[in-house]
Image (cartoon, helix red, strand yellow):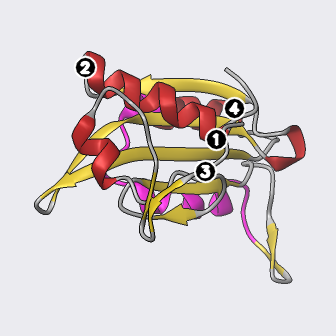
Amino acid sequence: MKTIAWRNSGHMLFESEHKTFNRKADIISRGNVYSNAQTSSYIRPFSETKCNGIVNPPGHLRDFDLKPFLPTIPGEVLEYVKSVSTDKQVALYRIRHYVGKRPVIHGWIVTKDWHENHALLRCFYTHGGRKSRSVIDEAVKYLTDGK
């Protein structure tokens, strides 16, 4: 895993081929994060039903964890996350920057949870260019213990 170095008090040093993203990236970090550069959350498995002493129907907690990603999550990503989270928790990362108020989503990263060292499961590149792909490839270095 790549260690975060700080460029200034509010932005990490991020070195992709996408200069605008590099300049705007505040933090890329594991776990539940809501920042200018990422939205991420642990996604509980379909089989997990108990939360705060309440028993929920199967899938309810997973659907709750996925809500922050709607409606921007592509169907392919959503289906993949659902397929790998039937009985194990995963982490889902949406990597983006803003142009004005408009988000530019570069892609999605799915990893195993902290019990399994955040091993990479899959990357989805949703913004086709080489620079955008380099953002996801660089983010993976901060989120996993290897590609």
The amino acid on which the numbered mark 1 sits, given as a three-letter code, is: Leu
Residue at image point 83% right, 39% down: 117
Give the mark, 2 or 3, whose residue is nearer the N terminus: 3
Separation of residues labelled 1 and 4 (CA atoms): 18 Å
- Residue depicted at x 81% and y 42%: 88
Q: Which residue is mark 4?
A: 84
Q: Which residue is mark 3?
A: 4
Q: CA distance from mark 2 to mark 3?
A: 26 Å
Query: Which of pointers 3 and 1 indicates the residue nearer the eye?
Result: 3
Mark 3 falls on what kind of element?
loop
Residue 13 visible in this rendered orientation of the protein: yes
Q: Are marks 2 and 3 in contact (CB under 8 Å)?
A: no
The residue wearing badge 2 is 128
Q: Which residues are magenta?
A: 56-77
Residue 9: x and y, percent? Answer: 45, 71
Name the disc covering residue 143, or none: 1
- Work out how far the residue at label 3 is from the one at label 1, CA to CA, in angstroms: 11 Å
**Reading the chain from its start, which is encountered first: label 2 or label 1?**
2
In the image, residue 62 lies in the stretch drawn in magenta: yes
Does the residue at mark 2 contact the one at mark 1 (Cβ under 8 Å)? no
- What is the three-letter code of the residue carrying label 4? Val
97 displayed left or right of 28: left
Q: Is 2 on the left-hand or right-hand side of 75?
A: right
